[in-house]
Image (cartoon, rainbow, N blue to C red):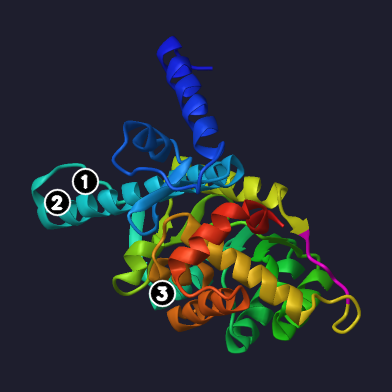
């Protein structure tokens, strides 16, 4: 697929990538043209080990590029919001001004608006929840969600794989599953979204932006954007696994397995080039918790620096896919 120029460039990318992984210590010269080409195509990341770049597995690059598309949607939403604010200021002087299809809300405003919109949902609710959920938050929405199921609304929720180790969440899932809700888990990054009847959607701020200030969410009613977010959720759902519904203590994920999954998810985020603050927000954990996890990884391998940890990952890429 693509033009002859695109095919030729891709052939060059493959050639350079094969050379990059064929030997050596995995470090690439960040100033070299070949390195810039790999970074452009997501097959190398900068800053992972000091001033060098390192090649990444194509499997991880594919997931990262797919998520970059969602980041572009978030960027477009912010730009559209700027135009909406301009229209609000100058709207009286313009005939036929339309209501913006994208609204940015604080976390509290977003939760209140979600509750309002759910009252009118008739068909489906799709939820992507990559981070943990507090027991109080689960209790607050249980009755609401059971009522949705009782009136025939189909509900699908995607959680991070490590979530299955949370007793409060397991209990919550079991109660909703008894009412017909479906749950799956994924070890891969996915967007935090709520989508109702494919008519509206909420998605969280980009983690890098949220790390710099108050976290919030965007309410989207533009059909094309809602459709895009719904399709992105569908792709994540299709590659996820069914929630393990074993009772606690009988096949439930072990604490050691949960710890390993958490370590792996943290390192995937950092290997993708995110800061620790942005990675913590994306994974729904405190930055201090993430820092502790990184230190545990280093201690377990007798490593003294993040540089050594990055080198270890470069030599053991299968660890991120285990």
Magenta-tinted stretch: 242-246
Mark 3 to mark 2: distance in Å?
27 Å
Task: Note whether residue 195 is visible.
Answer: no
Disc 1 target residue = 97
Mark 1 residue element: loop
State the image coordinates of residue 170 (x, y, percent, origin top left): 76, 79
Mark 2 residue element: helix
Mark 1 to mark 3: distance in Å?
28 Å
**Image quadrant in which the C terminus is located:** bottom right
Q: Is residue 166 above or below residue 119?
A: below
- Using a 10 Å C-alpha cutoff, classify the residue at mark 2 as few (fewer than 14 neighbours), some (14 to 19) or many (20 or more): some
Which one is earlier in the sequence, the residue at label 1 or at label 3?
A: 1
State the image coordinates of residue 30 (x, y, percent, origin top left): 33, 44
Q: Nearer the viewer, residue 1 or 117?
A: 1
State the image coordinates of residue 81 (x, y, percent, origin top left): 27, 54
Q: Nearer the viewer, residue 85 or 310?
A: 310
- Using a 10 Å C-alpha cutoff, classify the residue at mark 3 as few (fewer than 14 neighbours), some (14 to 19) or many (20 or more): some
Image depth: mark 1 or mark 3 in front: 3
Disc 3 target residue = 107
Q: Is residue 193 magenta?
A: no
The residue at the point 89 percent across, 75 percent down is: 251
Question: Residue most toward the front?
Answer: 24
Q: Is there CB contact under 8 Å for labels 2 and 1?
A: yes
Helix, strand or loop: magenta stretch: loop
The residue at the point 83 percent across, 68 percent down is: 244
Q: Nearer the viewer, residue 3 or 59?
A: 59
Disc 2 target residue = 91
Q: Is residue 142 above or below residue 88?
A: below
State the image coordinates of residue 26 (x, y, percent, origin top left): 49, 47
The residue at the point 40 percent across, 47 percent down is: 73
């Amino acid at each position: 697929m693509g033009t002859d120029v695109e095919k030729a460039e891709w052939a060059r990318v493959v050639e350079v990538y094969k050379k990059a992984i064929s030997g050596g210590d995995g470090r690439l010269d960040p100033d070299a043209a070949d390195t810039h080409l790999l970074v452009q195509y997501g097959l190398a990341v900068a800053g992972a080990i000091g001033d060098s770049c390192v090649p990444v597995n194509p499997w991880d690059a594919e997931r990262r590029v797919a998520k970059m598309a969602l980041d572009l949607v978030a960027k477009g939403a912010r730009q559209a919001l700027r135009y909406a604010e301009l229209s609000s200021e100058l709207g009286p002087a313009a005939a036929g001004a339309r209501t913006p299809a994208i609204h940015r809300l604080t976390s509290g405003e977003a939760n209140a608006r979600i509750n309002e919109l759910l009252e009118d949902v008739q068909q489906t609710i799709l939820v992507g929840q990559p981070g943990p959920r507090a027991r109080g938050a689960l209790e607050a929405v249980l009755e609401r969600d059971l009522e949705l199921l009782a009136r025939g609304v189909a509900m699908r929720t995607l959680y991070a794989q490590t979530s299955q180790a949370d007793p409060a969440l397991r209990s919550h899932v079991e109660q909703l599953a008894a009412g017909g809700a479906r749950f799956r888990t994924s070890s891969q990054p996915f967007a935090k979204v709520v989508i109702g009847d494919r008519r509206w959607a909420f998605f969280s701020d980009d983690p890098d932006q949220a790390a710099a200030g108050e976290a919030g969410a965007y309410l989207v009613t533009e059909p094309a954007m809602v459709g895009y977010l719904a399709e992105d959720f569908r792709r994540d759902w299709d590659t996820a696994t069914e929630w393990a519904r074993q009772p606690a203590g009988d096949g439930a994920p072990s604490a050691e397995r949960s710890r390993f999954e958490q370590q792996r998810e943290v390192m995937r985020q950092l290997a993708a080039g995110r800061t620790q603050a942005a990675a913590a927000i994306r994974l729904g954990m405190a930055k201090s918790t993430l820092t502790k996890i990184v230190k545990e990884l280093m201690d377990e391998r007798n490593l003294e620096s993040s540089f050594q940890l990055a080198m270890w990952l470069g030599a053991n890429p299968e660890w991120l896919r285990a």
